[in-house]
């Protein structure tokens, strides 16, 4: 179990680093162009890795429902939004708001899908995250 938790933390660190790098690229280009290059370079990278280790076309894509492919457009919006936000509100604030959105959608999806466990406890956890974000935002700057 510890290896899975470590991998999740590493993935989270990489997401933060990726957002920061794409935010910097967006300063020189635009959020949309930054998103384009993120996905283009990622496509080339994953293609090379998959060709080397195998598994690029190992499944049956036609067996998936149409909506299973919406992750691509949603990912493009996510990357572009993060690239646009980081230079404007900072990496930490962007990350906290993204995590809040993920937690809210996670609780909603758990409720809709009937996941086991207390929905009230999950909702309370999200409320605590939102309260923590409000506290962490700090006092407004005075000019």
Image (cartoon, helix red, strand yellow):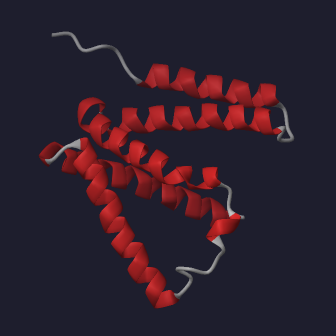
What residue do we see at 82% from left, 41% from top?
A: 115
Name the one closer to the observer, 40 or 134.
40
* The furthest residue to the top: 142
For the C terminus, the quadrant is top left
Asked if residue 25 is positioned above or below residue 3 in the image, the reply reads above
Pick the residue in front: 99 or 4.
99
Q: Position of residue 65 (x, y in %)?
A: 68, 56
Q: Quadrant of residue 1?
A: bottom right
Residue drawn at (39%, 82%) of the image: 48
How far from the left and from the top, in percent, is residue 12?
Answer: 49, 53
The residue nearer to you, when weighing 123 against 139, is: 123
- Left or right position of 132 against 41: right
Residue 71 is left or right of residue 3, and the answer is left
Residue 114, position in %: x, y? 84, 37
Whether 2 is drawn above or below 83: the answer is below
Residue 124 higher or lower than 87, as above or below: above
Count how many numbered circles sit on residues in the image. Answer: 0
For the residue pair 68 and 136, the one nearer the viewer reads as 68
Q: What is the x, y in percent for residue 19?
A: 34, 49
Left of 25 or right of it: where is 3?
A: right
């Amino acid at each position: 179990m510890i290896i899975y938790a470590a991998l999740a933390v590493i993935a989270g660190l990489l997401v933060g680093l990726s957002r920061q790098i794409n935010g910097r690229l967006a300063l020189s280009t635009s959020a949309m162009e930054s998103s384009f290059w993120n996905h283009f370079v990622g496509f080339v990278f994953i293609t090379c890795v998959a060709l080397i280790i195998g598994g690029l076309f190992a499944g049956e894509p036609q067996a998936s429902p149409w909506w299973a492919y919406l992750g691509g457009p949603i990912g493009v919006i996510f990357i572009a939004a993060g690239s646009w936000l980081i230079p404007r509100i900072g990496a930490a604030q962007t990350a906290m708001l993204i995590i809040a959105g993920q937690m809210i959608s996670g609780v909603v999806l758990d409720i809709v899908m009937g996941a086991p466990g207390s929905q009230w406890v999950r909702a309370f956890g999200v409320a605590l995250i939102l309260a923590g974000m409000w506290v962490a935002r700090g006092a407004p700057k005075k000019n």
